[in-house]
Amino acid sequence: MLVNTLDKVVFAILLLSFMQLPLLSNHYLQFVSGQLDALQQQVDSYQQNAELHKYPSIQKMIDDFKKNPNLAVRTDAEQKQQTMYEYQELSNAISVFEQGTYYQKAKYMFSPQRWETLEKVLKNFKPGISIEPVLLAYSGVAALLFGGMVMWPLRRAERAFKP
């Protein structure tokens, strides 16, 4: 009896948790989109500078700057390189959130190297429930599967101790 009640409670908690994921992924997408927009302006100015000085690409310009004997120019090149890396990472994130599956989005958001971004997103996140039928179905299936995995050892233990 206790295991059955616990099973229902675990399922309810998991279901409500999984129902938050679509909303959280939308918040995450909006946050990353804002960051990408800010970096886009910098990348555009890098592109204009590269074209103005006849570089075939931003990367060629950065590589040339890295070879410059002036330390300030080399440091600027490293900063530009970091900006380009962040821009590429954010572009990849946007494609995951616009084209990825429910699982891919969750895997991306909860990966350890992105916890800092997730913490920033969670500061402004307000729980709710998506009314999209497909997402509700995914949430239900995920809650059933994870609930079954969590409760399986307890059910086995209960059967082992029954007379």
Image (spheres, grey):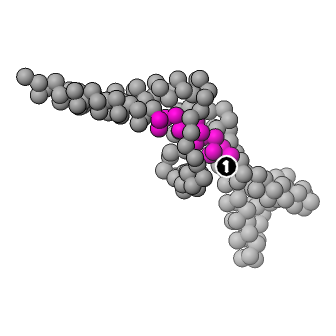
21 drawn magenta = yes
Give the camera-side residue of 94 and 51.
94
Let me know if residue 93 appears in the view.
no
Identify the residue at image location x=63%, y=38%: 96
Q: Is residue 70 left or right of residue 129?
A: right
Give the camera-side residue of 119 and 93.
119
Amino acid tagged 1: Val
Give, as a single range, the part of the protein colored magenta. 16-30
Q: Is residue 67 left or right of residue 114?
A: right
Let me know if residue 76 appears in the view.
yes
The image quadrant of residue 24 is top right
Magenta stretch mostly in which secondary structure? Answer: helix
Instruction: Report the residue that reaches farthest toward the left.
Output: 163
Identify the residue at image location x=41%, y=36%: 13
Relative to residue 74, is residue 30 depicted above or below?
above
Identify the residue at image location x=66%, y=44%: 29
Which type of secondary structure does the marked residue at label 1 adopt? helix
Q: Is residue 39 left or right of residue 99?
A: right
Expressed as whole percent of the image width and height from the top left, the position of residue 16 reads 47, 35
Expressed as whole percent of the image width and height from the top left, the position of residue 66 reads 72, 66
Expressed as whole percent of the image width and height from the top left, the position of residue 38 reads 76, 56
Q: Is residue 107 left or right of residue 92?
A: left
Identify the residue at image location x=35%, y=33%: 9
Q: Which residue is mark 1?
A: 32
34 drawn magenta = no
